[in-house]
Amino acid sequence: MLPSAVTEDLRRVVGREAVIDAANDLRIFERDGSIEGAVPDAVVLASTTQQVADVIKIAARNKIPIVPRGAGTGLSGGAVTIKGGIALQVTRMRRILEIDTVAQTALVEPGVVNKELSVVAAQHGLFYAPDPSSQNACTIGGNAAENSGGPHCLYYGVTTNHVLGMEVVLADGSVHWVNGDTPDRIGLDLCGVLVGSEGTLCAITKIKVKLLRIPPSVATLLAAFPSIETASQAVSAVIGNAIVPAALEMMDSVTVGAVEAHYHAGYPTDAGAVLLVEVDGIEESTRELMAAIGKILSSNQGYGLREAQTPGERELLWAGRKGAIGALGRIKPNYYLHDGVVPRSRLPQVLSAVGEIGEHYKLPVANVFHAGDGNLHPNILFDMRDKQVMPQVESAGEEMLRAVVELGGTLSGEHGIGLEKNAFMPWIYGPDDLDAMHRVKDALDPDAMLNPGKVFPDPTSERVVHLAGRTGLAVEAKWW
Ligand SMILES: Cc1cc2nc3c(=O)[nH]c(=O)nc-3n(C[C@H](O)[C@H](O)[C@H](O)COP(=O)(O)OP(=O)(O)OC[C@H]3O[C@@H](n4cnc5c(N)ncnc54)[C@H](O)[C@@H]3O)c2cc1C
């Protein structure tokens, strides 16, 4: 609980009803989409940049941790107030302030829901390319903070490639614009540093993004494969033939079973794995590309190739893919999802390691992922009410990430490091690399009040101490 004088100060800034501190109401903000939770001391619902700045000043004055929060769909514990303090919710800042059809840009507040921007931009023949599967709920602010990806980021690039500039509030409450209207980032690229900083360096209060013209033609193909290995070979073969589709997604048989039972989209339930491939552009080019892709898939054991014949059919195929994680609830009520990335050619090895780990722990695992990027998403399925199973789930997740790193990969493709993977950062960064990152953090947030306990290994956390003990890693006394 915050000291009552602090709560009163916050209420003066945002209004009485915009500060939540009743125990039952706070429970809603305990979690994001990941498995760990911690109840904040208070939630503040800010409506303007000035309010965000004033709230951060109050927190700074009183040395209270502050955690920016969007829709809470994050999958790495980023929005969880693990050190207590204030959850600074920005979803009331949800105006699309400007769509410039000539410059093809949009200026938005951080609480704008990702899909909403594309729906509004479509009235001008434009769209916003990064499309996380959670795009019906997640916010552009959350996307910028996580540097989110999505099925169409294989071709179009992840969020950082689409952010031109941002208005941000730093840990002392000062308001700044980083970068601006043009793609060229002159001087130090502060926008590049702050996109993907997971709420640890600033609160984002406005974002200027690029919009793209809606392509005149789109073709979407579903193909079945006998196994996840053959589907992975086909992915490498497509890209090895110098074709980069707009999207190249894979689902294994466990996922297909759950998705088909829910969406009835015609996914083949007898397949070991399926690929969903999309190309876009002018009609002639999509025809040509789809024909070439079809040949490559067939010569790599692909069968049952089916191209969507109508926009409705295409939408249904995508609804199945984007709703896949929700559909897994048919198998078990909870999932633990990591998003390691490997060089694409290593997908068969890493997926077979993932399968073995699942079998070892007797936990069902469902894979649904951005195969073209080598960005796997093993979903470990379990029931959180069974307390015995939790340590197994966490160990299985850790071993999967270990396999990713041993195969030359890295810890996250798009979900961020947050709370769940900060203990593993020393697997991929040496002490000097981590120190360089710490110095940026120190410069922008010297009292470590913005989203503490995230991204950087936290020596006060049980998981870091446990890992350090096992691997002989030195754990610094300071936490960030
Ligand atoms: C079913 C499902 C599918 C998903 N699919 C994808 C996918 O395809 N690709 C992908 O990349 N992610 C995916 N995600 C993860 C998640 O949706 C993204 O990380 C998303 O960007 C989080 O947005 P949010 O608004 O929910 O942020 P939150 O979860 O509220 O916060 C995420 C992080 O951003 C910080 N943050 C939020 N807003 C701000 C702000 N205004 N200023 C500073 N920091 C801020 C928080 O402190 C936290 O660290 C999926 C999640 C689910 C549940």
Image (cartoon, rainbow, N blue to C red):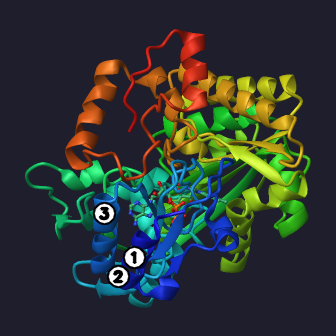
Who comes first in sequence, dot 2 or dot 3?
Answer: 2
The amino acid marked with disc number 3 is Val
Q: Where is residue 326 in the image (x, y as percent from the top left)?
A: 76, 61
Task: Specify the quadrant that holds the C terminus.
Answer: top left
Callouts 2 and 1 close, C-beta under 8 Å:
yes
183 sits left or right of 472 in the view: left
Q: Which residue is drawn at 27% across and 48% down?
A: 445
Where's residue 136, x and y in %? 60, 73
Q: Residue at x 63, y 30 (%)?
A: 347
The answer to the question of whether label 3 and label 1 lie on touching residues, with beta carbons closer than 8 A, is no
Gap between marks 2 and 3 measured at Cα: 30 Å
The tally of labels here is 3
User: Which residue type carries mark 2?
Assistant: Val
State the residue in front, 152 or 379: 379
Kindly give the residue lying farthest to the top in the view shown.
472
Q: What element carries label 3?
A: strand
* Residue 95 sits above or below residue 223 on the image: below
Q: How far apart are marks 2 and 1 (CA)?
A: 5 Å
Tag 1, which secondary structure?
A: helix
At label 1, which amino acid type do we have?
Leu
Classify 10 Å Cα crowding around label 1: few (below 14), some (14-19), many (20 and above).
many
Residue 412, numbered circle: none
Q: Nearer the viewer, mark 3 or mark 1?
A: 1
Residue at 77% x, 31% y is 391
Residue situated in front as seen by the camera: 22 or 74: 22
Residue 61 visible in the shown view? yes
Frontmost of labels 2 and 3 is 2
Q: Mark 3 points at which residue?
A: 163
Horizontal relation, residue 83 to residue 229: left or right: left
Q: Is residue 206 visible?
A: no
Residue annotated with mark 2: 13
Mark 1 — residue?
10
